Amino acid sequence: MARKPCLRIVGLSRTERSLLASILRGHGFEVMEADAPSSCEVPTLEPCNILTARQVQVLRALRRYGSREMTARALGIALKTVDAHLEHIYKRAGVRTRIEALCWACRRGLLDEDRSGCEASGSRPKASPEALA
């Protein structure tokens, strides 16, 4: 017996996910929960504009500066604001950690530099070696 193709749906409300999942199951697909471990190689269905521009900016700063604290300083926002953005990113992307979020964004080309936002200001804090560890 052939194995059913498997998909994961992220970035939609619970109601939208449930509706799409029932349609896909009707067509012979197995649908994983959005928060299933991302270590498995399962294709993911997601809207193309899953993150806001500010959330992408937070991810770019996180990659550049290496820590939540340095990201907050670089963007001129509170650490709690960075954490709130990260929580929304995790939920929308279906990931659980900063590393997973950065890998997810990198695979989608979201981390390509565009010389806008905090990087254009010219005043960048330097990341310490321990912040990058």
Image (cartoon, rainbow, N blue to C red):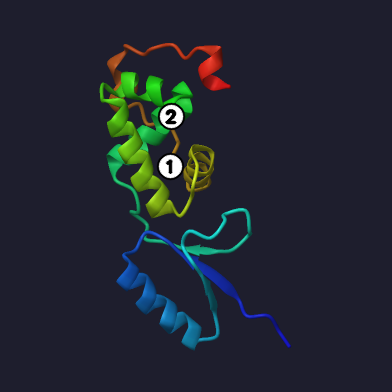
Label ID, residue 2: none
Q: Is residue 43 left or right of residue 85?
A: right
Label 1, residues with CA under 10 Å away: few <14, some 14-19, many ≥20? some
- Please report the residue visible at 37 percent of the width from the left and 24 percent of the height from the top: 71
If the image is split into quadrants, where does the N terminus sit?
bottom right
Q: Is residue 40 left or right of residue 130?
A: right
- The CA distance from mark 2 to mark 1 is 13 Å
Tags 2 and 1 in contact by the CB under 8 Å rule? no
Dot 1: what SS?
loop
Residue 114, x across and y down, in percent: 37, 31
Say which residue label 1 marks.
110
Q: Identify residue type, mark 2.
A: Leu
Q: Nearer the viewer, mark 2 or mark 1?
A: 2
Residue 84, x across and y down, in percent: 31, 39
> In the image shown, does 113 or 127 lie closer to the viewer?
127
- Please report the residue visible at 60 percent of the width from the left and 76 percent of the height from the top: 5
Label 2, residues with CA under 10 Å away: few <14, some 14-19, many ≥20? many
If the image is split into quadrants, where does the C terminus sit?
top right
Q: Identify residue type, mark 1.
A: Leu
Say which residue label 2 marks.
62
Residue 58, x across and y down, in percent: 36, 33
Q: Residue furthest front?
A: 80
